[in-house]
Image (spheres, rainbow, N blue to C red):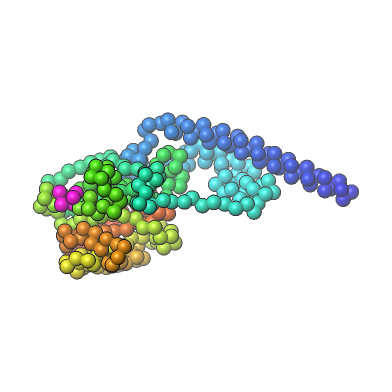
Amino acid sequence: MFKKGKMILKNRKKYSLKLAFYLLIIYGVFALTYYSAIKNNQNINNENFVKFILKGGNISNLNDMKLSTIVGKTMNYIFKIDFSSPTSILKFGGLDGAENKKLQYNDDYSDLEKLKEISTYIEDPYPSDSNNPIIYLYNSHQLENYSNNSLEIYGITPNVLMTTYLFKEKLNNNGISTIAETANMTELLSINGWDHSYSYKASRLLLLEKINKYNSLKYFIDIHRDSVSKEVSTAKIGDKDYARILFVIGLEHSGYEKNLTLATNINNLINKYYPNLSRGIYKKEGSGVDGIYNQDVSSGCMLIEVGSKDNNINEVMNTTSALTDIFSKYIKGER
């Protein structure tokens, strides 16, 4: 009797493993077919994605419309298998306990070729010019990317260029005349035979060009993203998640106190209206750092880290809305 029960248990386990195996094959065929269809659709790219969200598109709908999501929800409902969680598949087949690997990010600017495999230059989908802009937005490190979780199937990798374009559009829509840099920084480095260490020299050329072209410019914002953990880079304010920001001030030039005063005033407004959104002001000097960040060019220069590598585009969007509100208040005289 004991042997018979043991045999039944063994057969059930074999059946479960076979069923899980066949389900994985079916799921794989569906997912690969859909993935190929998506990849062949030239209308889906980073630029059109920016257009989509600027027009008020709901990013979560993209994930809900994926065939892989529909199949996954069906499998979860019938067999309690969550394809987004490998451990549930293993448990279904009685093989739980296997080790999972985390996605690794590469934002090492010392190897631009590897970085370009992950993140690419994104054109501004709505390039605009202005006779009297007040704010100039740019990115010394254009390829710093965010999490592309649920967007990778579309070939979309959000990076700081998206942050810049979103911020620019929101500022302009709020009556703050703003322009964004459209030059490809990686190409600029390559043309001049410069490596990554010349990034701030390259952006300085563009910065000086804009200052000479537009006498109306008062604020020059270099947008980056940090590499800290998501626990550090994310804040919940009300019912929304935000990518936290950090001001970086270089102390290795004689006029840094004016840049520090500007950052302090804006940071105070952020703390007033969006508590915990800011991580504060980081003062940098010494060996191994730039120490200036082109902030010697104008007292209106600042460097802002928006979120980190693990933040998603929704969190970044919420932060650009908050920053638009804050800069609007500051420019209108609130302190």
Q: Residue at x 34, y 38 (%)?
A: 48
- Would residue 152 appear left or right of 267 to someone viewing this image? right
As for residue 162 lying within the magenta part, the answer is: no
Q: Residue at x 43, y 38 (%)?
A: 154
Residue 19 at least partly seen: yes
Query: Is 237 above or below relative to 33?
Result: below
Query: Is 156 above or below relative to 284?
Result: above
Residue 49: percent from left, percent from top: 35, 41
Residue 233: percent from left, percent from top: 39, 60
Magenta span dominant secondary structure? helix
Query: Is 58 above or below relative to 97?
Result: above
Q: Residue at x 27, y 60 (%)?
A: 290
- 324 and 94: which one is in front? 94
Residue 164 at least partly seen: no
Corner quadrant of residue 75: top right
- 140 and 172: which one is in front? 140
Corner quadrant of residue 116: top left
Q: Report the magenta residues as a range.
A: 205-209
Q: Residue at x 74, y 45 (%)?
A: 13
Residue 47: percent from left, percent from top: 32, 39
Residue 230: percent from left, percent from top: 43, 59
Quadrant in which the C terminus is drawn: bottom left
